Amino acid sequence: MQTRRSFLQFGAATALASAFTSVRAQAAWPNRPLRIIIPFAAGGSSDFIARLISNPLGEALGVNVIVDNRPGNAGNLGAAIVATANDQHTVMLSDTGSLAISPLVTPNLNFKLNQLAGVSMLGYSPHLLVLHPAVPANNLRELVELSKKKPINVASAGSGSPNHLGVVEIALATGMRWQHVPYKGGAQALADTAAGNTDAVLNGMLATLPLVQAGKLKAIAVSKRTRVPLLPNLETVAEQGVANFESGTYQGVIAPSTQPKAQLEKLNAALIKVIRTPELRARMLEAGAEVSTSTSAGLDEFITQEAKRWGNVIKRAGKNIEGAA
């Protein structure tokens, strides 16, 4: 009897010690470098924000933060890496609109959205519709008229990206004739348009504004419902005839859905604290982006709503989703 009682006491103590160890491990998270996957090439909006927050986020969490660019397949390559990560130290910073659209346009997607969980939204950057300076159009109406003589080559961050579908929506409303030229990220699309290899691109202001300011690209519209302070004379797409049009790049952090809730909450709090500091908020505004944060559940709901919005655009476009030349 004494032996049985001792055995039970030992078992209970072992279970308690194991639970205590588990709690301590959770409390100590993260306990090694945190890797932020960027599913696009360096130089885009996601990359800019990741590098902006990496050092202060590392200080807040007490570990190094590594930015790892993994471009490919319109962001799906990087998303798949995060969806299947099991180290509890791999997350993704991406345009959440692209994530919402991927299942709608990519057959045989190698991950499922339920394998991913939102952590927090970080920022919003409206799209700028920009042209190579040699394109003889100074507003959307002139671009549409020009396209009727010769279809416009429009670059994007990849098939099914929000900046691709934003052009689809504009073309549906205006009758613009165009041909889609997809790239592995917004940075490459911008570079080729600035080089004159494509005529136009609709891309996040954060990454696009420097090229406009340098005279390498010509801005003819902004996708926000209201004009932006940095370019007060630039008309919105809605002002130029596409009623209620608004698009942009909504940057957020995504984790594997297997990540413990306590870790998601800890990372959410750290991200919001960092991005809301006066210094980083000012850096974002100077670059043409707004700080916009959310709860984990709020980001998940946003992705659901984006899927509905762009799903409707895809349905309306039909066979003309890659251009109506």
Image (cartoon, helix red, strand yellow):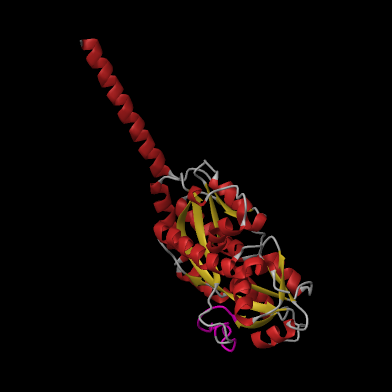
Residue 229 lies within the magenta run = yes
Judge by depth and name the residue closer to the eye, 79 or 325: 325
Which quadrant holds residue 194? bottom right
Say which quadrant the N terminus sits in.
top left
Residue 112, horizontal then vertical, whole percent: 53, 49
Judge by depth and name the residue closer to the eye, 164 or 90: 164
Visible residue check, residue 283: no
Residue ID at (51%, 62%): 307
Range covered by the magenta-colored residues: 222-238
Residue 162, horizontal then vertical, whole percent: 59, 67
Q: Is residue 168 left or right of residue 224?
A: right
Residue 118, horizontal then vertical, whole percent: 46, 55
Q: Residue furthest left?
A: 1
Residue ID at (56%, 56%): 103
Say which quadrant the C terminus sits in.
bottom right
Residue ID at (69%, 88%): 142
Q: For the stretch drawn in magenta, what is the main secondary structure?
A: loop
165 over 7 or under it: above or below: below
